[in-house]
Amino acid sequence: MVNLFASTEDIFIECSIDEDLQIIGEIDEICRVIENLLSNAIKFSISGSTINLSARKVTNEVLISIQDRGPGIPESEIPMLFKRFWQGQSGKRTASSTGLGLYTCRQIVEAHNGKIWCENVPEVGAKFSIRLPAI
């Protein structure tokens, strides 16, 4: 579904995923988080751009990052991103939103003893990252 959405928006997803990554937890729930973050990255990226998805092992954790090519997120909005029903006012919003996606992502990641956060990459866009315990 994400690939189809990306192709209709003329956005390419470039993946860099280490081999043999194993995460402790429910794979369906983790996939739900990644799909949500990718969907958001597509929504806010500039048409014709590339989204980078990476996953690698760092000590006893797996670090997953999704970097979009959008307008970025105002620093004042970053602390609010994962709050229930919160919706930012910036960016390229072409689809409706309930304000539950990132909140749900945080709930799932924290239930897996992980951490999720967002940072701006100057002149590039927003980067969402997740750290989860690895096997």
Image (spheres, rainbow, N blue to C red):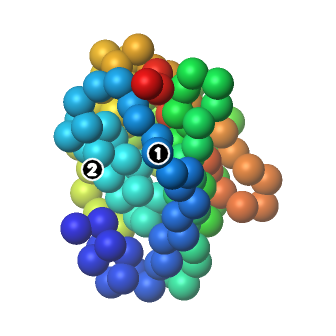
Q: In the visual, does 100 lie left or right of 79?
A: left
Q: In the visual, does 75 lie left or right of 54?
A: right
> Label for residue 20?
1
Q: Amino acid at mark 2?
A: Ser
Q: Secondary structure at mark 2?
A: loop
> Label for residue 97?
2
Which residue in the rendered view is the most extreme toward the right? Answer: 122
Front residue of this view, candidates 68 and 77:
68
Front residue of this view, candidates 5 and 99:
5
Please give the name of the residue rendered at 44% of the width and 85% of the height, measured from the top-left corner: 10
Q: Is residue 92 visible?
A: no
Measure how far apart labels 1 and 2 are at the Cα level.
35 Å
| Location of residue 116 with respect to 15 vertically, above or below | above
Where does residue 24 sit, x and y in percent of width and height? 35, 24
Q: Amino acid at mark 1?
A: Asp
Nearer to us: label 1 or label 2: 1
Quarter where residue 7 is shown: bottom left
| Location of residue 124 with respect to 131 vertically, above or below | below
Q: Secondary structure at mark 1?
A: loop
- Can you say which quadrant of the picture contains the N terminus? bottom left
Q: In the visual, does 42 lie left or right of 75?
A: left
